[in-house]
Image (tube, rainbow, N blue to C red):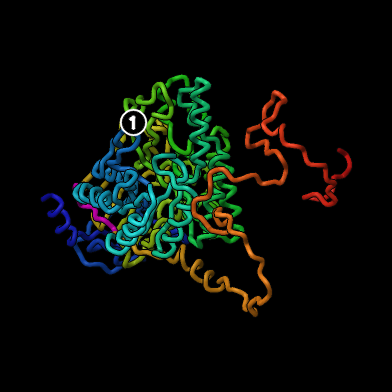
Amino acid sequence: MRSIAMSSSSAMVRILIKGGKVVNDDCTQEADVYIENGIIQQVGKELMIPGGAKVIDASGKLVLPGGIDTSVHLEESFMNATTVDDFYSGTKAALAGGTTMVIGHVLPEKNESLLEAYEKCRHSADSKACCDYALHIGVTWWGPKVRAEMEKLVRDKGVNSFQMFMAYKDMFMLRDSELFQVLQHCKDIGAIARVHAENGELVSEGAKEALDLGISGPEGIEISRPEELEAEATHRAITIANRAHCPIYLVNVSSMSAGDVVATAKMQGKVVHGETTTAHTVLNGMQYYHQDWSHAAAHVTVPPLRLDPNTPNFLMSLLGNDTLNVVGSDHRPFTVKQKAMGKDDFTKIPHGLPGIQDRMSVIWEKGVIGGKMDENRFVAVTSSNAAKIYNLYPRKGRIIPGADADVVVWDPEGSKIISVENQVQGGDINPYEGLRCHGVPIVTISRGRLVYENGMFTCAEGSGKFCPLRTFPDYLYKKMVQREKCQAVKAVEREPYTGEVVAVANSGKRDTGSSDLDTPTRPCTRHGGMRDLHESSFSLSGAQIDDNIPKRSSARILAPPGGRSSGIW
């Protein structure tokens, strides 16, 4: 009943934000903002407004579009643990930090119906969310059923984004051919293809190797998942997307080398967007070598924080110059007790860091105060770009008449010290413990209602709404659709060949020309020599498996592959 009372009374709420500076992603202006019926009605000076409005004095303050957190994991079971925030506590913490919309994850088990997983999440979230939310659906397996359900989710359920994993072998990982087909399908239905890029095969081998060497602590996460595995997979993901003519959105970009790959792809004109996380732009991987196991384990996330201490600065700079477009919290809070499931084996430590509440202030401190971006770029990476990518702009992500009244009054001079003691979000650890942040939200307005003011909440459980997202966002697809029109591949028109064709003797063997989706795991010998040393019938003892076969006489090669040798050898 509380939420019904709240939503019916919200129609009468009138708010005037007076004397502040309105900050959008492209400009800053001194203006008052008048809100009524959950919508921004007027923006400007000396507004004519009806009486009875609550006046908020924003002198010396900034008025920002509410933050959009594009990656949160609420009420999610993952690696045998359930995150310690549900949609109530998580969205409440978001509002306290100046975020007015979150996009959560639905990660179906292998062979689980995507639709059923979605409905289960909606059922729980609708009655709890305090702010607007949407959902990404994980494509954790592939088949005709998944293809059909993706279409249904897009058509009937207000979903426009799917997340694919190149990591998490035997759990979520898709093979390259599957990823290619999923991306082709995303393009056909106009969805946003989010891809987590790490080489899952080599991650799995690296983890075995580390454990064999007796490395069982949290440092194993960094040792087994070096950044070259992320850079390689990032390049591969961009290549696969380019062949599928699908815009790609890379998530959790966490290293300098992966950032370079994204930058290069953008310079080549590929339609690539990138999201990093608050943690990766602020913290480095030395945390994993801390003497206290619980401190080190608290920082276990995927991809891991990077050892190179220049990484956070580099990633923040990429956010500043539009190489990376969005920063999410990737909020996945676990307690020390949950992390301790991996006390003897780092592969069993649940991956994830909290951050839904701290994202905006931490990025302001390290990005704006740190001189990496101005306040307009801050609005872009925390709100506007996400709104554009997910087809919500300018309804969200901009302070303009007609937009949703999701607004934050931001004090650029105010400061707070982050601590687990006074946080609203769940968990008993905070990776930014003790960090003094300048730039704090003092008022948060969601759906035209004042929900948070100076540490006090007036939001009701279930007062947030699910936001259906439309497909084919212009920000991603306009360029791609046009490109396909002008770069269409055409067959060459020519007279048919009428000469003789050699007869092929059918020896009962498989036709070598047949195309097969599943290539054999081990290709046959790629050269014409007698021995393929890679095929490991080779023995170091000197006696070989083919010693009984007479050797062919040597042949002088006049033009060896790659040109003649220079004669040095």
Q: Is residue 461 magenta?
A: yes
Residue 497 at x, y percent in the picture: 65, 76
Q: Residue at x 32, y 25 (%)?
A: 337
Residue 545 in view in this figure: yes
Name which quarter of the figure residue 19 lies in: bottom left
Residue 70 at x, y percent in the picture: 38, 50
Per the rendered image, the range of residues in magenta is: 460-467
Q: Residue furthest left?
A: 1
Q: Is residue 452 magenta?
A: no
Give the camera-side residue of 299 and 525: 525
Tag 1 residue: 420
Residue 374 in view in this figure: no
Name which quarter of the figure residue 311 lies in: top right
Q: Residue at x 46, y 42 (%)?
A: 167
Give the camera-side residue of 521 and 34: 521
Name which quarter of the figure residue 530 lies in: top right
Q: Residue furthest bottom?
A: 495
Which element type, helix, strand or loop, lies under badge 1?
helix
Give the camera-side residue of 508 and 318: 508
Name above or below for residue 226 compared with residue 47: above
| Residue type, label 1 | Val
